[in-house]
Image (cartoon, coloured by chain):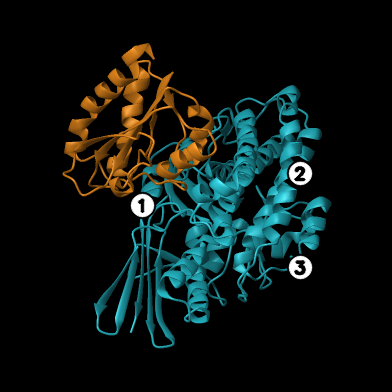
Chain colours: A cyan, B orange
Amino acid sequence: MSDEPRSSGTREIRTDYLARVEGEGAMLVRVRGDEVEEVQFKIFEPPRFFEALLRGRQFTEAPDITARICGICPIAYIASSCNAMEAVCGIELPEQVRLLRRLIYCGEWIESHVLHTAMLHAPDFLGYDGAVEMARDRRDIVEMALRLKKAGNEVMRVVGGREVHPVNLRVGGMYRAPTKAELATLVPELEWARAASLAFTRFVASFDFPDFEQDYAFVALRQPGEYAIERGRLATSTGLDIAVSEYEQHFTETHVERSNALHSTLAGVGNYLVGPLARYALNRAELSPLAQELAAEVGLGEVCRNPFRSIVVRAVETVYAADEALRLIAQYEPPDPPGIEAIPRAGTGHGCTEAPRGICWHRYEIDGEGTILDAKIVPPTSQNQKTIEEDLVGVVRQSLHLPDDELAHRCEQTIRNYDPCISCATHFLKLEIERT
Amino acid sequence: MRAAACLGSRYRGDDAVGPLVADRLRAAGAAVLDCDDEPTRLLDAWAGLDLVVIVDAVCSGAEVGTVHRVEAGDGPLPRDLGLASTHAFSIVDTLELGRAIGLAPRRVVVVGIEGAAFGMGDPLTPEVEAALGGVADSVLAELREGGG
């Protein structure tokens, strides 16, 4: 970081990249006196390249192609595209096949949430520059996190056939159903993961959180009887309850002049929030008893509006994901056949699932031969982008008394609250604060 | 044992150089560690190996196509190389973390190929494409040295 005079009365601060956030982006905070004049935040490039790549390909290729958008959450892209294609083909997944998809998704939640909470986010609250510095003093946290990540990864490997970019999932189900014995091998480590993430939740809940709340409009999937992950209707805290196929009637993306970014808005509401806080606010009552008790114990209440406490919600969701994975394994009966053959028919299908960072929405139009004519993908981070800007305005306004380096750090921390998944887009984030 | 760890995204211009080198190394029968875009997945795989050669696109301001070779020694990897892959947790930090908790290879060499275009859907620049074969050959030779 450099901190150099730019012109009289103006200071500019730059960091070469925003550490511990995937990829690249740009952020500008302009302050005049005590007023925050402008916050510009650009981290997400919409996945237009992939949408273009999909056109002309077979509908069955969409899961493998979209899985490449993100190395951290391939299952989100696979599951959303499968849901969309199954909707076009009129396929309803047999229950055990659907539950296998939910199980592998639990693995992804564990891996992704732990990477973020323990390795990328916790150092903010513990006063370390990053996990490397934290590891020197708190090796126990890093070792626990790596073991937890591995537990999630193992679920991906056993169900998905590979731990990186699983190959066993397809439109219509699975290529091969794992045996009961194969899933049983996951149980001891998942039991450990459930206990370890429980202790970790109590630990992160003890952090000192900035006193900051926003009146968010929450958006998440909702499915009666379960904490929605791999299916559901779209629900909002403003009272909307719609089918996934109705998304575009209520949500719009607007191109932002200054960058490649798109800002998503909800009609009549404006910007909104997806991800752990939204899921928790809308679906808390569907968490397992263990996760609900834990949430109550650590003081999350019915709704959490402090984005800095999202680390606690992610930790609770990690406990839930381990708990749910164990439940799914206990009830498992291998489906035979492991999937349904997908016969293409001309039409448009929609799919939406809860990626670790929030809803990942897909729409595809295919012809009668199964060729993809059009594709539209709305990832969670692009939906949160406008809300992140609003948080930054609020946080900067509240933190103007801080020296520039601490203010810059607080801004970075504010962005990290969202676990922004921008590997899909970018490389380095330039952070600039101007004061006049 | 010796292995390569090749980082990068096939869809992002010169960032694809890592995966493309990996393809050639695999075809020649060399051990390549897979982590996709999440380097901490390497920690268990590379712990205790005799040598890991990290292959990645870099962005240091040098002439495009320049091949940098850095022997990591005991110190941290140079941050000014701008190892360019899109990672949640950078390869530089992953190595440091591994050393802090005893999950690091005995020796690490970084082979960085200077890139120019990193946009989604960008083609490989001709200079990087020209460097590809030489990089793969030299990494292969390094991995085979000493019978590893």
Q: Position of residue A169 (x, y in %)?
A: 58, 33
Between disc 2 and disc 1, whose residue precedes?
A: 2
Instruction: Give the Cα separation between the discs numbered 2 and 3.
Output: 23 Å
Query: If the image is split into quadrants, where does the N terminus of chain A sit?
Result: bottom left
Q: Is residue A278 left or right of residue B54?
A: right
Q: Is residue A24 left or right of residue A75?
A: left
What chain does badge 2 belong to? Answer: A
Q: Nearer the viewer, mark 2 or mark 3?
A: 2
Q: Is residue B73 above or below residue A248?
A: above
Which sits in the foreground, A312 or B109?
A: B109
Query: If the image is split into quadrants, where does the C terminus of chain A sit?
Result: bottom left
Q: Position of residue B37 (x, y in %)?
A: 44, 41
Disc marking residue A302: 3
Q: In the figure, residue A171 lies in which quadrant?
A: top right
Which sits in the foreground, A63 or A38?
A: A38
Q: Residue at x 34, y 77 (%)?
A: A434
Do pointers 2 and 1 mark residues of a single chain? yes
Do pointers 2 and 3 mark residues of a single chain? yes
Disc marking residue A195: 2
Disc marking residue A427: 1
Amino acid type at image mark 1: His
What chain does badge 3 belong to? Answer: A
Q: Is residue A152 above or below residue A414?
A: above
Q: Position of residue A119 (x, y in %)?
A: 55, 49
